[in-house]
Amino acid sequence: MQPRKEKGKKVWVCLSCGEVKSADNDSQESLSFAIEHSDPEKGKMLVVKDEEPIRMHPTKEMECPTCKKIVLVEYWELQTRSADESPTRFFKCENGHTWREYD
């Protein structure tokens, strides 16, 4: 199960079958749905009851070149060029602006 926001509302989305169930207020019904649709064969189920967004990458505060102010930024690295060259660093600010840096 993966928590998402669709049309401003929290929902649970089953990654196996794609079924969607409301997660507003994390009612017993929606949590039962989450447990029912989890697949123990594929790993543990993650139940998130937080209003904070799920971050897939590390974060730090730095200046966004588009916002022109210090904001929270997610960052990650990818090897976009040949293996003997340094990886490319990608950044995405909390306002959705993305940029990259090369060495």
Image: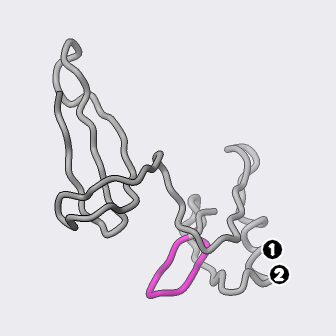
On screen, residue 80 above or below 40: above
Label placed on residue 21: none
Q: Residue beneath label 2, please? A: 28
On screen, residue 99 above or below 8: above
Q: Which kind of residue does numbered mark 1 sit on?
A: Ser
| Magenta segment includes 72 | no
Q: Which kind of residue does numbered mark 2 sit on?
A: Gln
On screen, residue 47 above or below 19: above
User: Dividing the image into 4 quarters, which one contains the N terminus?
Assistant: bottom right
Q: Position of residue 73 (x, y in %)?
A: 37, 55
Measure the C-alpha gap from mark 2 to mark 1.
Answer: 6 Å
Question: Which structural element holds mark 2?
Answer: helix
Label placed on residue 32: 1
Task: Give 102 or 9, whichever is nearer the viewer.
Answer: 102
Residue range corresponding to the magenta coloring: 4-13
Task: Give 22 or 80, whichever is nearer the viewer.
Answer: 80
Give the residue displayed 20% in from the left and 31% down from the top: 80
Q: Quadrant of residue 16?
A: bottom right
Q: Are marks 2 and 1 in contact (CB under 8 Å)?
A: yes
Task: Give 86 or 62, whichever is nearer the viewer.
Answer: 62
Give the residue displayed 70% in from the left and 44% down from the top: 43
Give the residue displayed 83% in from the left and 81% down from the top: 28
Task: Classify mark 1: residues with Cα within 10 Å, few (<14), some (14-19) or many (20+).
Answer: few
On screen, residue 94 above or below 5: above
Task: Classify mark 2: residues with Cα within 10 Å, few (<14), some (14-19) or many (20+).
Answer: few
